[in-house]
Image: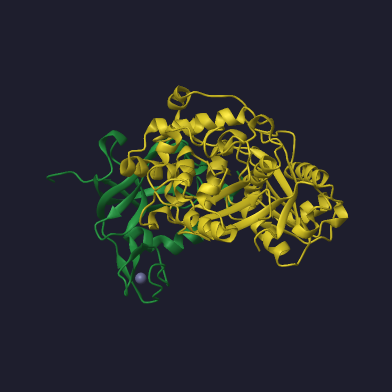
Chain colours: A green, B yellow
Amino acid sequence: MSNMSVPKAPRIWQLAERRYRLVGSKCLKCGRLFVGLRKVCPQCKSTEFEYVELSRRGKIYSYTVIRAPPMEREKYGPYIMAIVELDDGCRLTAEIVDCSSEEIDIGTEVEATFRKIGEESESGIIYYACKFRPVVKGV
Amino acid sequence: MRGDVAVIGVGMTKFDEHWNKQLRDLFVEAALEALDDARVDLKDVKAMFIGNMGSGMWVEQEHLGPLLADYLGIPGVPSLKVESACASSGMAFRLGFMSVAAGLHDIVLVGGVEKMSDVTTGESTHHLATAADREWEAFYGVTFPGLFALIARRHMKQYGTTREQLAKVAVKNHKHGSYNPKAQYQRAISIDDVLNSPLVADPLRLLDSSPISDGAAAVIIARSDIARRFTDTPVYVLGSGTATDTIALHDRDDITILRSVVLAAKEAYSMAKVEPEDVNLAEVHDCFTIAEILAYEDLGFVKKGEGGRLIDEGMTELGGKIPVNPSGGLKAKGHPVGATGIAQVVEVTLQLRNEAGKRQVSNAEIGLTHNIGGSGASCVVHILGRSRR
Ligand SMILES: [Zn+2]
Protein backbone atom coordinates (compact mmCIF):
# COMPACT_ATOMS: atom_id res chain seq x y z
CA MET A 1 0.00 0.00 0.00
CA SER A 2 2.99 2.27 -0.47
CA ASN A 3 1.06 4.59 -2.77
CA MET A 4 -1.36 5.47 0.04
CA SER A 5 1.41 7.22 1.88
CA VAL A 6 2.04 9.74 -0.87
CA PRO A 7 1.03 13.13 0.59
CA LYS A 8 -1.87 14.47 -1.41
CA ALA A 9 -2.24 17.74 0.51
CA PRO A 10 -0.47 20.00 -2.02
CA ARG A 11 -2.55 18.67 -4.89
CA ILE A 12 -5.73 18.88 -2.89
CA TRP A 13 -4.96 22.48 -1.97
CA GLN A 14 -4.15 23.49 -5.55
CA LEU A 15 -7.61 22.45 -6.70
CA ALA A 16 -9.61 23.18 -3.55
CA GLU A 17 -11.33 26.36 -4.65
CA ARG A 18 -12.21 25.03 -8.09
CA ARG A 19 -13.68 21.91 -6.57
CA TYR A 20 -15.48 23.59 -3.66
CA ARG A 21 -17.13 26.33 -5.71
CA LEU A 22 -17.37 24.34 -8.96
CA VAL A 23 -15.25 26.86 -10.85
CA GLY A 24 -14.67 26.11 -14.50
CA SER A 25 -13.12 27.72 -17.55
CA LYS A 26 -15.22 29.45 -20.21
CA CYS A 27 -13.73 29.98 -23.66
CA LEU A 28 -14.51 33.56 -24.61
CA LYS A 29 -14.36 32.76 -28.33
CA CYS A 30 -16.57 29.67 -28.71
CA GLY A 31 -18.26 29.67 -25.31
CA ARG A 32 -17.33 26.12 -24.38
CA LEU A 33 -17.13 25.33 -20.68
CA PHE A 34 -14.70 23.00 -18.94
CA VAL A 35 -14.21 21.82 -15.38
CA GLY A 36 -10.81 22.88 -14.10
CA LEU A 37 -8.44 25.48 -15.41
CA ARG A 38 -7.74 25.70 -19.12
CA LYS A 39 -5.44 28.07 -20.95
CA VAL A 40 -6.04 26.82 -24.51
CA CYS A 41 -9.41 25.75 -25.88
CA PRO A 42 -9.32 22.25 -27.41
CA GLN A 43 -12.34 23.17 -29.52
CA CYS A 44 -11.35 26.50 -31.11
CA LYS A 45 -7.70 26.96 -29.93
CA SER A 46 -8.46 30.34 -28.38
CA THR A 47 -6.39 31.40 -25.36
CA GLU A 48 -8.99 33.87 -24.08
CA PHE A 49 -10.72 32.47 -21.02
CA GLU A 50 -12.66 33.61 -18.03
CA TYR A 51 -13.13 31.53 -14.92
CA VAL A 52 -16.75 31.15 -13.95
CA GLU A 53 -18.86 29.31 -11.42
CA LEU A 54 -20.51 26.44 -13.25
CA SER A 55 -24.21 25.70 -12.97
CA ARG A 56 -25.00 23.64 -9.88
CA ARG A 57 -27.91 21.83 -11.52
CA GLY A 58 -28.07 19.48 -14.45
CA LYS A 59 -29.16 16.09 -15.76
CA ILE A 60 -27.58 12.65 -15.68
CA TYR A 61 -25.96 11.93 -19.07
CA SER A 62 -24.86 8.40 -18.09
CA TYR A 63 -24.37 6.53 -14.81
CA THR A 64 -23.06 3.33 -13.27
CA VAL A 65 -22.73 1.71 -9.85
CA ILE A 66 -19.13 1.09 -8.81
CA ARG A 67 -19.08 -2.29 -7.06
CA ALA A 68 -15.32 -2.91 -7.31
CA PRO A 69 -13.85 0.32 -5.91
CA PRO A 70 -10.22 1.41 -5.91
CA MET A 71 -8.31 0.78 -2.66
CA GLU A 72 -8.87 4.25 -1.25
CA ARG A 73 -12.65 3.86 -1.46
CA GLU A 74 -13.07 0.22 -0.54
CA LYS A 75 -14.68 1.05 2.79
CA TYR A 76 -17.44 3.09 1.14
CA GLY A 77 -19.09 0.11 -0.58
CA PRO A 78 -21.05 0.36 -3.85
CA TYR A 79 -21.64 3.94 -4.97
CA ILE A 80 -23.13 5.61 -8.04
CA MET A 81 -20.91 7.51 -10.47
CA ALA A 82 -22.26 9.59 -13.33
CA ILE A 83 -21.40 12.00 -16.05
CA VAL A 84 -23.63 15.00 -15.32
CA GLU A 85 -24.54 17.52 -18.00
CA LEU A 86 -24.98 20.83 -16.20
CA ASP A 87 -27.66 23.31 -17.27
CA ASP A 88 -24.93 25.53 -18.75
CA GLY A 89 -23.81 22.64 -21.01
CA CYS A 90 -20.61 21.68 -19.15
CA ARG A 91 -20.20 18.00 -18.37
CA LEU A 92 -18.36 16.54 -15.40
CA THR A 93 -17.87 13.25 -13.55
CA ALA A 94 -19.43 13.04 -10.11
CA GLU A 95 -20.88 10.73 -7.50
CA ILE A 96 -24.67 10.64 -7.18
CA VAL A 97 -25.83 10.46 -3.55
CA ASP A 98 -28.97 10.42 -1.41
CA CYS A 99 -30.72 7.88 -3.66
CA SER A 100 -30.51 4.32 -4.92
CA SER A 101 -29.63 3.42 -8.51
CA GLU A 102 -33.25 2.32 -9.06
CA GLU A 103 -34.42 5.89 -8.45
CA ILE A 104 -32.36 7.46 -11.25
CA ASP A 105 -31.96 7.17 -15.02
CA ILE A 106 -30.38 9.04 -17.89
CA GLY A 107 -32.10 12.43 -17.78
CA THR A 108 -32.73 12.53 -14.02
CA GLU A 109 -32.39 16.11 -12.71
CA VAL A 110 -29.66 16.53 -10.12
CA GLU A 111 -28.10 19.33 -8.06
CA ALA A 112 -24.66 19.83 -6.52
CA THR A 113 -24.09 19.17 -2.84
CA PHE A 114 -20.86 19.71 -0.89
CA ARG A 115 -19.54 16.45 0.53
CA LYS A 116 -16.51 14.58 1.81
CA ILE A 117 -14.71 12.63 -0.91
CA GLY A 118 -12.06 10.87 1.18
CA GLU A 119 -9.04 11.34 3.38
CA GLU A 120 -5.30 11.14 3.02
CA SER A 121 -4.93 8.77 5.99
CA GLU A 122 -6.47 8.30 9.42
CA SER A 123 -4.69 11.35 10.72
CA GLY A 124 -4.25 13.23 7.45
CA ILE A 125 -6.32 15.86 5.72
CA ILE A 126 -9.90 15.19 4.63
CA TYR A 127 -10.82 16.23 1.14
CA TYR A 128 -14.10 17.60 -0.07
CA ALA A 129 -15.79 18.40 -3.35
CA CYS A 130 -19.19 18.42 -5.01
CA LYS A 131 -21.36 15.36 -5.37
CA PHE A 132 -24.83 15.50 -6.91
CA ARG A 133 -28.23 14.41 -5.62
CA PRO A 134 -31.62 14.11 -7.33
CA VAL A 135 -33.64 17.34 -7.26
CA VAL A 136 -36.64 16.90 -5.01
CA LYS A 137 -39.70 18.16 -6.88
CA GLY A 138 -41.91 20.77 -5.25
CA VAL A 139 -39.47 21.83 -2.55
CA MET B 1 7.00 3.58 -45.16
CA ARG B 2 4.43 1.01 -46.25
CA GLY B 3 6.02 -2.42 -46.20
CA ASP B 4 9.49 -1.12 -45.32
CA VAL B 5 9.53 -2.92 -41.95
CA ALA B 6 8.87 -6.59 -41.26
CA VAL B 7 8.16 -8.69 -38.19
CA ILE B 8 10.68 -11.54 -38.28
CA GLY B 9 10.14 -13.22 -34.92
CA VAL B 10 7.60 -13.37 -32.11
CA GLY B 11 7.46 -14.64 -28.55
CA MET B 12 5.28 -14.38 -25.49
CA THR B 13 4.85 -15.90 -22.07
CA LYS B 14 1.60 -17.51 -21.14
CA PHE B 15 -0.64 -14.76 -19.75
CA ASP B 16 -1.56 -15.77 -16.22
CA GLU B 17 -1.10 -14.95 -12.56
CA HIS B 18 2.61 -15.76 -12.38
CA TRP B 19 3.02 -15.85 -8.61
CA ASN B 20 6.62 -17.06 -8.74
CA LYS B 21 8.01 -14.87 -11.50
CA GLN B 22 9.17 -11.27 -11.54
CA LEU B 23 8.61 -8.64 -14.21
CA ARG B 24 12.15 -9.01 -15.52
CA ASP B 25 11.83 -12.83 -15.69
CA LEU B 26 8.68 -12.56 -17.78
CA PHE B 27 10.23 -10.07 -20.18
CA VAL B 28 13.42 -12.08 -20.71
CA GLU B 29 11.40 -15.26 -21.33
CA ALA B 30 9.33 -13.58 -24.06
CA ALA B 31 12.33 -11.80 -25.58
CA LEU B 32 14.44 -14.97 -25.82
CA GLU B 33 11.55 -16.79 -27.49
CA ALA B 34 11.22 -13.99 -30.06
CA LEU B 35 14.97 -13.95 -30.74
CA ASP B 36 14.96 -17.72 -31.18
CA ASP B 37 11.94 -17.56 -33.49
CA ALA B 38 13.68 -14.87 -35.59
CA ARG B 39 17.01 -16.72 -35.49
CA VAL B 40 18.58 -13.38 -34.56
CA ASP B 41 21.67 -13.20 -32.33
CA LEU B 42 21.54 -10.96 -29.28
CA LYS B 43 24.46 -8.96 -30.66
CA ASP B 44 22.35 -8.00 -33.70
CA VAL B 45 19.69 -6.24 -31.63
CA LYS B 46 20.37 -2.55 -32.20
CA ALA B 47 17.65 -1.01 -30.01
CA MET B 48 14.79 -1.92 -27.67
CA PHE B 49 11.42 -0.30 -27.08
CA ILE B 50 9.45 -1.64 -24.10
CA GLY B 51 5.77 -0.94 -23.51
CA ASN B 52 4.79 -0.82 -19.86
CA MET B 53 2.07 1.10 -18.10
CA GLY B 54 2.85 1.13 -14.42
CA SER B 55 5.83 -0.82 -13.15
CA GLY B 56 6.56 2.12 -10.84
CA MET B 57 3.20 1.60 -9.16
CA TRP B 58 2.79 -2.18 -9.34
CA VAL B 59 6.32 -3.31 -8.47
CA GLU B 60 8.04 -0.03 -7.54
CA GLN B 61 10.48 -0.36 -10.42
CA GLU B 62 10.98 2.34 -13.01
CA HIS B 63 13.80 2.76 -15.52
CA LEU B 64 12.79 -0.42 -17.32
CA GLY B 65 14.77 0.40 -20.46
CA PRO B 66 18.21 -0.26 -19.02
CA LEU B 67 16.99 -2.86 -16.51
CA LEU B 68 15.57 -5.09 -19.24
CA ALA B 69 18.50 -4.57 -21.62
CA ASP B 70 20.81 -5.54 -18.76
CA TYR B 71 18.83 -8.67 -17.87
CA LEU B 72 18.60 -9.62 -21.55
CA GLY B 73 22.37 -9.55 -21.52
CA ILE B 74 22.86 -6.55 -23.77
CA PRO B 75 23.69 -3.56 -21.56
CA GLY B 76 24.86 -0.78 -23.85
CA VAL B 77 22.05 -1.16 -26.34
CA PRO B 78 19.67 1.82 -26.49
CA SER B 79 16.51 0.81 -24.64
CA LEU B 80 13.47 2.88 -23.80
CA LYS B 81 10.26 2.40 -21.84
CA VAL B 82 7.13 3.65 -23.62
CA GLU B 83 3.98 4.50 -21.65
CA SER B 84 0.52 5.10 -23.01
CA ALA B 85 -1.59 3.27 -20.40
CA CYS B 86 -3.02 0.04 -21.86
CA ALA B 87 -1.77 1.06 -25.31
CA SER B 88 1.85 1.20 -24.12
CA SER B 89 3.28 -1.64 -26.17
CA GLY B 90 1.22 -0.83 -29.26
CA MET B 91 2.91 2.57 -29.02
CA ALA B 92 6.29 0.90 -28.46
CA PHE B 93 5.69 -1.01 -31.71
CA ARG B 94 4.92 2.27 -33.43
CA LEU B 95 8.23 3.75 -32.20
CA GLY B 96 10.15 0.63 -33.19
CA PHE B 97 8.54 0.80 -36.64
CA MET B 98 9.47 4.48 -36.94
CA SER B 99 13.08 3.86 -35.93
CA VAL B 100 13.55 1.09 -38.51
CA ALA B 101 11.60 2.90 -41.25
CA ALA B 102 13.71 6.00 -40.61
CA GLY B 103 16.87 3.98 -41.15
CA LEU B 104 18.15 4.53 -37.63
CA HIS B 105 18.32 0.83 -36.76
CA ASP B 106 18.03 -2.29 -38.90
CA ILE B 107 17.00 -4.82 -36.23
CA VAL B 108 14.95 -3.82 -33.19
CA LEU B 109 13.33 -5.70 -30.33
CA VAL B 110 9.94 -4.40 -29.27
CA GLY B 111 8.41 -5.79 -26.11
CA GLY B 112 5.66 -5.24 -23.61
CA VAL B 113 5.40 -6.39 -20.02
CA GLU B 114 3.23 -5.94 -16.95
CA LYS B 115 3.28 -7.57 -13.51
CA MET B 116 -0.05 -6.87 -11.82
CA SER B 117 -0.81 -9.77 -9.49
CA ASP B 118 1.57 -8.84 -6.65
CA VAL B 119 -0.95 -6.33 -5.24
CA THR B 120 -4.61 -6.44 -4.21
CA THR B 121 -7.42 -5.94 -6.72
CA GLY B 122 -8.23 -2.59 -5.08
CA GLU B 123 -4.65 -1.44 -5.59
CA SER B 124 -4.67 -2.54 -9.24
CA THR B 125 -8.00 -0.73 -9.70
CA HIS B 126 -6.40 2.40 -8.29
CA HIS B 127 -3.29 2.09 -10.49
CA LEU B 128 -5.34 1.51 -13.65
CA ALA B 129 -7.44 4.59 -12.88
CA THR B 130 -4.33 6.79 -13.15
CA ALA B 131 -4.86 6.49 -16.92
CA ALA B 132 -8.03 8.54 -16.51
CA ASP B 133 -7.96 12.21 -15.48
CA ARG B 134 -6.68 11.83 -11.92
CA GLU B 135 -8.03 15.15 -10.68
CA TRP B 136 -11.41 15.33 -12.45
CA GLU B 137 -12.40 11.69 -12.86
CA ALA B 138 -10.48 9.19 -10.69
CA PHE B 139 -10.41 11.55 -7.66
CA TYR B 140 -14.19 11.29 -7.46
CA GLY B 141 -14.11 7.48 -7.44
CA VAL B 142 -14.71 6.39 -11.03
CA THR B 143 -12.82 3.25 -12.08
CA PHE B 144 -11.98 1.80 -15.50
CA PRO B 145 -14.89 -0.63 -15.47
CA GLY B 146 -16.94 2.40 -14.41
CA LEU B 147 -15.88 4.51 -17.40
CA PHE B 148 -16.67 1.72 -19.85
CA ALA B 149 -19.98 1.14 -18.05
CA LEU B 150 -20.85 4.81 -18.65
CA ILE B 151 -20.10 4.24 -22.35
CA ALA B 152 -22.09 0.98 -22.41
CA ARG B 153 -25.18 2.57 -20.91
CA ARG B 154 -25.12 5.39 -23.50
CA HIS B 155 -24.54 2.91 -26.34
CA MET B 156 -27.51 0.83 -25.18
CA LYS B 157 -29.66 3.97 -24.93
CA GLN B 158 -28.63 5.49 -28.27
CA TYR B 159 -28.50 2.38 -30.46
CA GLY B 160 -30.52 -0.27 -28.65
CA THR B 161 -27.46 -2.45 -28.02
CA THR B 162 -28.54 -5.25 -25.68
CA ARG B 163 -27.06 -6.91 -22.60
CA GLU B 164 -27.09 -10.21 -24.52
CA GLN B 165 -25.06 -8.73 -27.39
CA LEU B 166 -22.39 -7.63 -24.91
CA ALA B 167 -22.37 -11.11 -23.39
CA LYS B 168 -21.89 -12.68 -26.82
CA VAL B 169 -18.55 -10.88 -27.17
CA ALA B 170 -17.25 -12.58 -24.02
CA VAL B 171 -18.66 -15.96 -25.08
CA LYS B 172 -16.96 -15.70 -28.48
CA ASN B 173 -13.61 -14.65 -27.04
CA HIS B 174 -13.64 -17.39 -24.42
CA LYS B 175 -14.37 -19.93 -27.15
CA HIS B 176 -11.40 -18.61 -29.14
CA GLY B 177 -9.25 -18.60 -26.00
CA SER B 178 -9.95 -22.29 -25.50
CA TYR B 179 -7.82 -22.90 -28.61
CA ASN B 180 -4.90 -20.79 -27.35
CA PRO B 181 -2.39 -22.57 -25.07
CA LYS B 182 -1.03 -19.17 -23.93
CA ALA B 183 -4.40 -17.81 -22.85
CA GLN B 184 -5.11 -17.19 -19.17
CA TYR B 185 -8.58 -18.75 -19.55
CA GLN B 186 -8.89 -21.71 -21.88
CA ARG B 187 -12.48 -22.63 -21.22
CA ALA B 188 -15.73 -21.82 -22.99
CA ILE B 189 -18.47 -19.92 -21.16
CA SER B 190 -22.18 -19.42 -21.90
CA ILE B 191 -24.31 -16.29 -22.23
CA ASP B 192 -25.96 -17.26 -18.92
CA ASP B 193 -22.55 -17.47 -17.26
CA VAL B 194 -21.92 -13.85 -18.27
CA LEU B 195 -25.39 -12.61 -17.29
CA ASN B 196 -25.20 -14.34 -13.91
CA SER B 197 -21.69 -13.20 -13.03
CA PRO B 198 -21.39 -10.48 -10.36
CA LEU B 199 -21.91 -6.87 -11.36
CA VAL B 200 -18.66 -4.87 -11.43
CA ALA B 201 -20.00 -1.54 -12.72
CA ASP B 202 -23.62 -1.70 -13.88
CA PRO B 203 -24.43 -2.79 -16.54
CA LEU B 204 -21.00 -4.48 -16.87
CA ARG B 205 -20.34 -7.75 -15.06
CA LEU B 206 -17.27 -9.70 -14.08
CA LEU B 207 -17.37 -11.78 -17.27
CA ASP B 208 -17.61 -8.63 -19.39
CA SER B 209 -14.20 -7.65 -18.03
CA SER B 210 -10.66 -8.63 -18.92
CA PRO B 211 -8.76 -10.08 -15.97
CA ILE B 212 -5.76 -8.83 -14.02
CA SER B 213 -2.76 -10.61 -15.52
CA ASP B 214 0.99 -10.96 -15.58
CA GLY B 215 2.82 -11.49 -18.82
CA ALA B 216 5.20 -10.32 -21.50
CA ALA B 217 5.34 -10.38 -25.28
CA ALA B 218 8.13 -9.48 -27.70
CA VAL B 219 8.70 -9.20 -31.42
CA ILE B 220 11.79 -8.68 -33.55
CA ILE B 221 11.37 -6.24 -36.40
CA ALA B 222 13.81 -5.55 -39.23
CA ARG B 223 14.23 -3.66 -42.48
CA SER B 224 12.21 -5.57 -45.06
CA ASP B 225 15.14 -5.86 -47.47
CA ILE B 226 17.10 -7.95 -44.95
CA ALA B 227 14.14 -9.83 -43.42
CA ARG B 228 14.50 -12.92 -45.60
CA ARG B 229 18.00 -13.51 -44.27
CA PHE B 230 16.29 -14.56 -41.05
CA THR B 231 12.92 -16.00 -41.98
CA ASP B 232 10.97 -17.39 -44.92
CA THR B 233 7.80 -15.85 -43.57
CA PRO B 234 8.33 -12.17 -42.82
CA VAL B 235 5.14 -10.30 -41.97
CA TYR B 236 5.14 -6.73 -43.27
CA VAL B 237 3.95 -3.59 -41.50
CA LEU B 238 1.68 -2.05 -44.12
CA GLY B 239 0.15 0.70 -42.05
CA SER B 240 0.60 2.43 -38.72
CA GLY B 241 -1.65 5.03 -37.11
CA THR B 242 -1.99 6.66 -33.75
CA ALA B 243 -4.02 9.48 -32.25
CA THR B 244 -5.33 10.93 -29.01
CA ASP B 245 -8.62 12.19 -27.61
CA THR B 246 -9.57 14.17 -24.50
CA ILE B 247 -8.23 12.51 -21.38
CA ALA B 248 -11.59 12.81 -19.59
CA LEU B 249 -14.54 10.90 -20.98
CA HIS B 250 -16.90 13.73 -19.95
CA ASP B 251 -15.18 16.20 -22.30
CA ARG B 252 -16.26 14.26 -25.42
CA ASP B 253 -19.38 15.33 -27.32
CA ASP B 254 -20.51 11.71 -27.83
CA ILE B 255 -18.92 9.13 -25.56
CA THR B 256 -20.03 6.23 -27.79
CA ILE B 257 -17.39 7.22 -30.36
CA LEU B 258 -13.69 6.78 -29.60
CA ARG B 259 -12.32 9.50 -31.86
CA SER B 260 -8.72 8.42 -31.27
CA VAL B 261 -9.62 5.08 -32.87
CA VAL B 262 -11.32 6.70 -35.87
CA LEU B 263 -8.26 8.92 -36.45
CA ALA B 264 -5.64 6.21 -35.87
CA ALA B 265 -7.49 3.79 -38.16
CA LYS B 266 -7.75 6.43 -40.87
CA GLU B 267 -3.99 6.97 -40.81
CA ALA B 268 -3.25 3.23 -40.80
CA TYR B 269 -5.70 2.37 -43.60
CA SER B 270 -4.41 5.26 -45.67
CA MET B 271 -0.75 4.24 -45.28
CA ALA B 272 -1.57 0.60 -45.99
CA LYS B 273 -3.85 1.49 -48.92
CA VAL B 274 -6.46 -0.94 -47.66
CA GLU B 275 -10.12 -0.57 -46.72
CA PRO B 276 -11.82 -2.06 -43.66
CA GLU B 277 -13.38 -4.77 -45.86
CA ASP B 278 -9.90 -5.92 -46.95
CA VAL B 279 -9.02 -6.94 -43.38
CA ASN B 280 -9.15 -10.72 -42.86
CA LEU B 281 -8.78 -10.72 -39.07
CA ALA B 282 -8.37 -8.25 -36.24
CA GLU B 283 -7.03 -8.33 -32.71
CA VAL B 284 -8.95 -5.58 -30.92
CA HIS B 285 -8.81 -4.10 -27.45
CA ASP B 286 -11.73 -5.81 -25.67
CA CYS B 287 -10.82 -4.67 -22.15
CA PHE B 288 -14.59 -4.79 -21.63
CA THR B 289 -17.17 -6.32 -23.97
CA ILE B 290 -18.53 -2.89 -24.93
CA ALA B 291 -15.04 -1.91 -26.11
CA GLU B 292 -15.10 -4.64 -28.78
CA ILE B 293 -18.50 -3.39 -30.01
CA LEU B 294 -17.04 0.14 -30.22
CA ALA B 295 -14.02 -1.24 -32.11
CA TYR B 296 -16.23 -2.82 -34.81
CA GLU B 297 -17.78 0.58 -35.39
CA ASP B 298 -14.83 2.92 -35.00
CA LEU B 299 -12.58 0.71 -37.19
CA GLY B 300 -15.24 0.88 -39.91
CA PHE B 301 -16.29 -2.79 -39.98
CA VAL B 302 -19.89 -1.56 -39.55
CA LYS B 303 -21.62 1.80 -39.22
CA LYS B 304 -21.86 3.49 -35.80
CA GLY B 305 -24.49 1.76 -33.70
CA GLU B 306 -24.47 -1.52 -35.64
CA GLY B 307 -21.79 -3.31 -33.63
CA GLY B 308 -24.38 -5.38 -31.80
CA ARG B 309 -25.73 -6.71 -35.08
CA LEU B 310 -22.26 -7.85 -36.16
CA ILE B 311 -21.86 -10.04 -33.07
CA ASP B 312 -25.46 -11.33 -33.42
CA GLU B 313 -24.73 -12.46 -36.96
CA GLY B 314 -21.60 -14.33 -35.91
CA MET B 315 -19.47 -12.39 -38.40
CA THR B 316 -16.60 -11.94 -35.95
CA GLU B 317 -16.29 -15.58 -34.86
CA LEU B 318 -13.66 -17.91 -36.22
CA GLY B 319 -15.15 -19.03 -39.53
CA GLY B 320 -17.07 -15.74 -39.89
CA LYS B 321 -16.44 -13.03 -42.46
CA ILE B 322 -14.00 -11.11 -40.24
CA PRO B 323 -12.81 -13.06 -37.19
CA VAL B 324 -12.04 -10.72 -34.31
CA ASN B 325 -9.77 -11.74 -31.44
CA PRO B 326 -8.95 -15.28 -32.57
CA SER B 327 -6.39 -15.30 -29.70
CA GLY B 328 -9.18 -15.00 -27.15
CA GLY B 329 -8.69 -11.26 -26.89
CA LEU B 330 -7.95 -9.41 -23.69
CA LYS B 331 -10.99 -11.12 -22.17
CA ALA B 332 -9.77 -14.72 -22.34
CA LYS B 333 -6.09 -14.46 -23.27
CA GLY B 334 -5.53 -12.03 -20.39
CA HIS B 335 -4.60 -8.35 -20.14
CA PRO B 336 -1.21 -7.59 -18.58
CA VAL B 337 -1.81 -4.03 -19.71
CA GLY B 338 1.64 -3.08 -20.96
CA ALA B 339 2.06 -6.38 -22.85
CA THR B 340 -1.26 -6.38 -24.66
CA GLY B 341 -0.33 -4.37 -27.75
CA ILE B 342 2.62 -6.59 -28.61
CA ALA B 343 0.64 -9.75 -27.84
CA GLN B 344 -1.79 -8.57 -30.52
CA VAL B 345 1.07 -8.25 -33.01
CA VAL B 346 2.27 -11.73 -31.99
CA GLU B 347 -1.16 -13.22 -32.75
CA VAL B 348 -1.63 -11.46 -36.10
CA THR B 349 1.88 -12.51 -37.13
CA LEU B 350 1.21 -16.17 -36.25
CA GLN B 351 -2.08 -16.00 -38.17
CA LEU B 352 -0.45 -14.49 -41.27
CA ARG B 353 2.30 -17.14 -41.07
CA ASN B 354 -0.44 -19.78 -40.96
CA GLU B 355 0.93 -21.03 -37.61
CA ALA B 356 -2.06 -20.38 -35.33
CA GLY B 357 -3.07 -24.02 -34.96
CA LYS B 358 -6.65 -24.72 -33.95
CA ARG B 359 -7.55 -21.04 -34.06
CA GLN B 360 -6.11 -20.43 -37.56
CA VAL B 361 -8.10 -18.03 -39.77
CA SER B 362 -8.07 -19.53 -43.27
CA ASN B 363 -6.42 -17.58 -46.10
CA ALA B 364 -5.42 -14.68 -43.86
CA GLU B 365 -3.60 -12.07 -45.95
CA ILE B 366 -4.16 -8.88 -43.95
CA GLY B 367 -4.55 -8.48 -40.19
CA LEU B 368 -5.18 -5.47 -37.97
CA THR B 369 -4.26 -4.64 -34.37
CA HIS B 370 -6.19 -2.08 -32.30
CA ASN B 371 -4.79 -1.07 -28.93
CA ILE B 372 -6.36 1.68 -26.80
CA GLY B 373 -5.14 3.49 -23.72
CA GLY B 374 -7.46 4.56 -20.92
CA SER B 375 -11.03 5.19 -21.97
CA GLY B 376 -9.73 5.75 -25.51
CA ALA B 377 -7.64 8.86 -24.88
CA SER B 378 -4.95 7.14 -26.93
CA CYS B 379 -5.13 4.57 -29.68
CA VAL B 380 -2.67 2.84 -31.96
CA VAL B 381 -3.63 0.75 -34.99
CA HIS B 382 -1.35 -1.40 -37.13
CA ILE B 383 -2.08 -3.23 -40.35
CA LEU B 384 0.11 -6.21 -41.14
CA GLY B 385 0.30 -8.19 -44.37
CA ARG B 386 1.66 -11.50 -45.60
CA SER B 387 2.97 -9.79 -48.72
CA ARG B 388 4.74 -6.46 -49.08
CA ARG B 389 2.12 -5.34 -51.68
ZN1 LIG C 1 -13.12 27.72 -27.69
Q: Using the image as rendered, state which of residue B6 and residue A128 is in the foreground.
A: B6
Residue B162, x across and y down, in percent: 37, 34
Q: Using the image as rendered, state which of residue B182 and residue B313 is in the foreground.
A: B313
Residue B343, x across and y down, in percent: 66, 43
Seen in the picture, residue B4 relative to B363 is either above or below; the reply is below
> Would residue A80 be found to the left or right of residue B98 on screen?
left
Figure quadrant, ligand 1:
bottom left
Asked if residue B340 can be seen in this view, the reply is yes
Quadrant in the rendering for residue B285 = top right
Asked if residue A96 can be seen in this view, the reply is no
> Would residue A104 be found to the left or right of residue B348 on screen?
left
Numbered disc total: 0
Q: Using the image as rendered, state which of residue B215 and residue B10 is in the foreground.
A: B10
Residue B173, x across and y down, in percent: 55, 33
Which residue is at a point 61% across and 57% down the rendered structure image?
B239
Q: Using the image as rendered, state which of residue B76 and residue A116 is in the foreground.
A: B76
Residue A99, x across and y down, in percent: 28, 38
> Would residue A45 be found to the left or right of residue B318 on screen?
left
Seen in the picture, residue B224 relative to B361 is either above or below; the reply is below
Quadrant in the rendering for residue B196 = top left
State the quadrant of the N terminus of chain A.
Answer: top right
Which residue is at a point 57% across and 28% down the rendered structure image?
B175
